[in-house]
Amino acid sequence: MFFELAALAYLIDMVFGEFPCKHPVALMGDVITAFERRFYSDRILPGALLVIGLIALALLVSVAVVYLCGFLPDWLSLMVLAALASTGLAMNMLHESVAALLTAEQPKQALSYLVSRDTQDMTETEVYKAGLETWSENLSDGVIAPLFYLLLFGLPGIAVYKAINTMDSMIAYKTERYFYFGKTAAIVDDIANYIPSRLTALLIVSLAKDKQRAWQCLRQDGNKLESPNAGFPIAAMAGALNVELGGDASYHGQIKHKPTLGLPVNPVDKSTLTQALQMKTGINLIVLSLLAAGAVLS
């Protein structure tokens, strides 16, 4: 277990956020775009080759970096690896991006940078609902899942996870273009996020004022969505806030019918989103406490 590395990486992300250089995820995105431009065909095989190739590349580069850091003094090696690993964590960026909906002059436009659904015809309630769902789901994809694989496998673990998640965000859509090409990426991402999404849901439940209600909503509604993972943190958040999330949404000009999660006891508005975003402090305290305890005991 890499508790010291994970704790330091988490602290670096908390304090500094994103570094002013090209992000490793952006580099992975460039590789995906270049591959798609050259080898795209809406078939499973080229999409699977992209998944295998990018995972292999991420693993090779990260293992090489770990090997080279072995020539440095232990303290310096830990600092370098933690700084690199912190680029795979996105708590600060996620929180700032969703919080921007609260102050943006055009919330719909701000939301369009965060979600793949159509935002131009959304009501105010739908904008804040989408913000809540983005915050909930991406707590898993952007924070807990990369941290989970960093703890298990060190820098190669988080590098491979970010490769998987980046492919999912770029090509794993059930559109005419990506239906088959992105299928392997979607399946691998579902597998990678199975445990982290449920850990994230439990973390949200632990921060709810009414933990019993949040737990009940998680158990009843967590598996309602088409995705095997996304519904769990969203259902936990719905129960924690006593609101209704999910429901129909427009993607690429077509309405997608989705089940609702939770009950509409409280309205979804600015104050609801603010309340959800305030969980950041509690999440940071819990995560750092667990990592510190793990570092001491390991």
Image (tube, grey):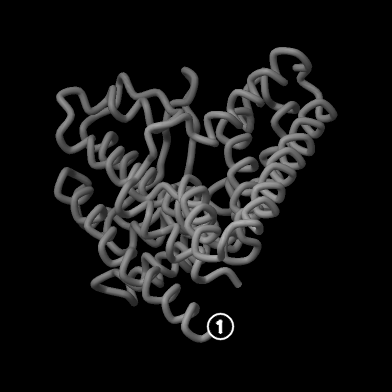
Quarter of the figure with residue 61: top right
From the viewer's side, name the closer residue of 219 and 32: 32
- 154 to the left or right of 118: right
From the viewer's side, name the closer residue of 157 and 230: 157
Above/below status of 141 relative to 205: above
Q: Within 10 Å of the Cα at label 1, are there few (<14), some (14-19), or many (20+) other Cα atoms?
A: few
Judging from the image, what secondary structure is the residue with disc 1 in? loop
Question: In the image as oriented, which residue stretches furthest toward the bottom?
Answer: 297
Q: Position of residue 179 (x, y in %)?
A: 70, 27
Q: Quadrant of the C terminus?
A: bottom right
- 126 to the left or right of 55: left
Q: Position of residue 184 (x, y in %)?
A: 75, 38
Disc 1 marks which residue?
298
Q: How many marks?
A: 1
- 213 to the left or right of 194: left
Q: Quadrant of the N terminus?
A: bottom right
Looking at the rendered structure, the kind of residue marked 1 is Ser
Question: In the image as oriented, which residue stretches furthest toward the right?
Answer: 45
Residue at image point 32% right, 75% down: 211
From the viewer's side, name the closer residue of 207 and 25: 25
Above/below status of 247 relative to 41: below
Q: Position of residue 129 (x, y in %)?
A: 30, 42
From the viewer's side, name the closer residue of 130 and 290: 290
- 15 to the left or right of 184: left
Q: Position of residue 112 (x, y in %)?
A: 36, 25
Residue at image point 28% right, 22% down: 109
Residue at image point 76% right, 20% down: 42
